[in-house]
Amino acid sequence: MRKHNFGAGPGILPESALQKSAAAALELNNIGMSILEISHRSKDFDAVMVQTKSLVKELLGVPDNYSILFLQGGASTQFAMVAMNLLHKKAAYVDSGVWANKAIKEAKLFGEVNVLASSKDKNYTYVPKGYSIPTDCDYLHITSNNTIYGTQMKSFPESPIPVVCDMSSDIFSRPVDVSKFDLIYAGAQKNMGPAGVTLVIIKNDILKEVNRVVPTMLRYQTHIEGDSLYNTPPVFSIYVCMATLEWLKSIGGVAAIEKINQQKADLFYGEVDNNPMFMGTCEKEDRSHMNACFLLKNPDLDDEFMKMAKDAGIIGIKGHRSVGGFRASMYNALPLESVQVMVQVMKEFAMKTA
């Protein structure tokens, strides 16, 4: 029996994608070889890459003047790559969580960083808003969803300068206007696939020569020209991404999953707000639909609730050490039924301990 997996990442994957990927690990398309064994320059893998890029383009509505890349190293590598390739003199950043802060630290290695706004003063429990964006910066960097603290940008700023966005933990969870961004990056292991591959969507005309030496592997232009095949890509991870995006398309795409994610969030946060034993940690208007952080009003009962959840087949809800309490990550592949089970456990816990 499958667990109710609320883990923050690597996250739950659709069962159909797991089954298809498991079959391909034994033999791909009746070719007598595993997906794990084929050449990344073979026609069989080329078909996988073409299909995966096509799905990204279709599901997100990526304009023709953007390149879609699949890179190694995780989103954390992008913290440095963005600055190495785009920061000429000064960049603007919004500090909305741990990962945004890490991106800021990396950017400072390559130039001046102007932190426009921060929610660190309240332990990142809200999304900074109302800041002015200076026109003398090379780009604005924002983080759409904050996995650790459970906040999410519900709208994006109108910017006079190029916009770079880390969408690692909520990409494909809702429609976005890609044309409003100049570079989007996302580690796959939340809503798209397994760890080991990072999606980068980059506007082709944003790249200009910078006055520093950038290693070949860390140049976006290298991977654009090489069509993500400059070196051996993470073949199997890309295959799982393809299978996951096929599942997403089959259920109606990003617009359809947004409605399901809204249902899950409404159900869960409704229980948090109405159950006398629990409370949320973030400003309500900024609550994430992907990562819901919550606390027991009496933390002495944490272990008892955790055991009750475990007995119900729920895993992955222990909160990050920076927040404490609990965190329910409700990524695309987590079914509504799992949230219903979680809510029922919360209700039963309140009755038991009242």
Image: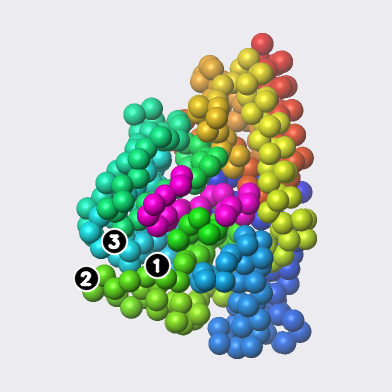
Q: How is the model colour-coded?
A: rainbow
Q: Which structural element holds mark 2? A: loop
Question: Looking at this view, is 318 or 16 the one in front?
Answer: 16
Q: Amino acid at mark 3?
A: Leu
Density class for disc 3 (Cα within 10 Å; few <14, some 14-19, many ≥20) is: many
Residue 225, quarter of picture: bottom left
Cα separation, mark 3 vs mark 2, equals 9 Å
| Residue drawn 48% across the image and 42% down it | 146
**Looking at the picture, does residue 91 appear above or below residue 51?**
above
* Residue identifier under label 1: 206
**Looking at the picture, does residue 98 appear above or below residue 352?**
below
| Residue drawn 72% across the image and 43% down it | 259
Q: Is residue 214 left or right of residue 71?
A: left
**Looking at the picture, does residue 261 appear above or below residue 301?**
below
| Residue drawn 52% across the image and 33% down it | 286
**Looking at the picture, does residue 120 appear above or below residue 252?**
above
* Residue identifier under label 3: 87
Q: Which quadrant holds the C terminus?
A: top right
Q: Is residue 193 left or right of residue 180?
A: right
Please report whichever mark, 3 or 1, sits nearer to the chain's N-terminal start. 3
Magenta residues, start to end: 157-177
Q: In front: mark 3 or mark 1?
A: 1
170 is within the stretch colored magenta: yes
Q: Amino acid at mark 2?
A: Asn
Q: Which structural element holds mark 3? A: loop
Label annotation for residue 211: 2
Density class for disc 2 (Cα within 10 Å; few <14, some 14-19, many ≥20) is: few
**Tag 2–tag 1 contact (CB < 8 Å):** no
Regarding residue 66, the answer to whether it shows in the image is yes
Q: Which structural element holds mark 1? A: helix
Q: Is residue 276 left or right of residue 93?
A: right
Cα separation, mark 2 vs mark 1, equals 15 Å
